[in-house]
Amino acid sequence: MRRFLVFVIILVPLFFQVAAFGQDSKMDLALDHYETIIDRCILMRDRAQRGEKIEADELKSLLEQVSSLRTTLQNSSKGMTARQRERFEKIKRRYTVAFQPGKVVSRSVVRLPKVDWVPRVEEILRFAQDDRLDASCHPEGAQRPKDLRFAQDEAPWRIGVMAIGGWQPSTLSYGAMATVTHNRLGFYIKGRSNFTKDIHESICSSDGTSEGTIIWSTGREKHPAWNLGAGVIFKIAGPLGIYAGSGYGNRTTLWEEASGSWAKVEEYSFKGACADAGIVLDISNFTASLGISSITFRNPSLEMGVGLRF
C-alpha cells in the first residue's frame, strides 16, 4: 500500500502539468479562430477598396463577430500565457490598422485551422461556425472545412505503438502497447514480461520451510513475471487522455536452494486478473503513457511508455 501511495503522489502532479498544457493548446486554437475572422474582414475590406461590390449585411455580420470574439478573449486573458497575450495584441493591432481610413492591408494566404471542440471558449466556436461565413469571404484557392461543426467527426483513426517498461522492487519488465483512437475514444492492448523462466522443483513457505523441513537458501532469488491486458482510452483535455483496462497476469518469487534447485515461495507468488490505469499524452505523431498496473491488486508496478502515432 505504501508503494501504491508513492505512485499516486508521482502521477498527480504530472496529471495537472499535462492538463495545463492542454489548456494552453485550447487558447491557441481560440486565437486561431480570432485571427481567421480578422483575416476575412481585412480581405473583404481589400475587395471593397478595389471597387468590388460588398454586401453591407455581410460586412456588418463579420464586424459584429470580431467585436464579440475580442470581448470573449479579453475576458479570458488571465488564462493566457505571455506568448498568447502578445499574439492577441498583435492581431488586434492588425485589425485596427487595417480599418483606419485609407488603409489597405491584406494577406496573400489565409490559414484556416482545423477546428476541435474548445469547451472553455464555446462562444468563439459558435461564431466561427456561423453559416453566414460563406466562401465569398475567401480568396480563390483558399481551402476551408466543409462544415466546421463536423470537423471533429471527420478526424481520422490514429494507430499508436509504444514500447513500455514496468518497474517493481526487485524486477523490471518490458513489452509493447498498441492504441487505436478516434476523436475522444479509443482502445488499447498491451503485453509485458521480464522474460525470466518460471522453473522450480519445490514449493516452500516464506518462513523457509518446505513440507515441514527447512530449506537452505543461497540468498539468490528470481521473479518471473508477465501480464496481458486491454482496455479503453478517453480523451479529457487537448492531448491528454486517460486509460483503464484489465487482463491476466502472473508473478512468481523463486528462492535458490544450496543444491542449486529453485523453490517457489507460495506467499509471494500470485496469478490472476490484473488491472491498470494511467494517462496518455498524444502530441502530433508522438505518444506517451504513464500508469500503474497490479495483479490481483497486489504488488503494483509503475508503467511508462513512449512511441509514435500514425
Image (tube, helix red, strand yellow):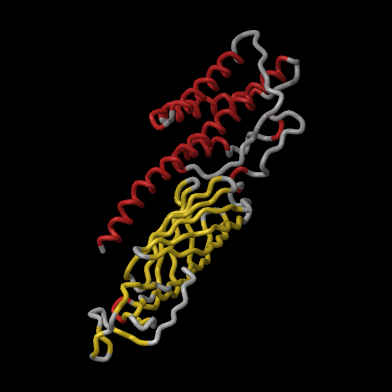
Residue 288, percent from left and from top: 50, 52
The residue positioned farthest toward the top in the image shown = 102
Q: Quadrant of the N terminus?
A: bottom left
What residue sits 48% from the left and 27% below the top?
83
- Name, please, the residue furthest toward the front: 259
Please report the residue visible at 39 percent of the width from the left and 59 percent of the height from the top. Answer: 302
Residue in view at x 70 percent, y 22 percent = 54
Which of the 4 image quarters holds residue 140?
top right
Identified at 47% across, 77% down, the residue is 197
Residues 170 and 240: in front is 170
Q: Position of residue 96 (x, y in %)?
A: 55, 15
- Residue 111 position (above or below residue 174): above
Using the image as rendered, state which of residue 273 and residue 298 is in the foreground: 298
Q: In this view, does 79 lie above or below 54?
A: below
Q: Is residue 223 above or below residue 143?
A: below
Residue 104 image position (x, y, % from top left): 67, 13
- Frontmost residue, 71 versus 218: 218
In the image: residue 285, left or right of residue 203: right
- Count of marks overlaid on the render: 0
Q: Between residues 122 and 286, which one lies in front from this camera angle?
A: 286
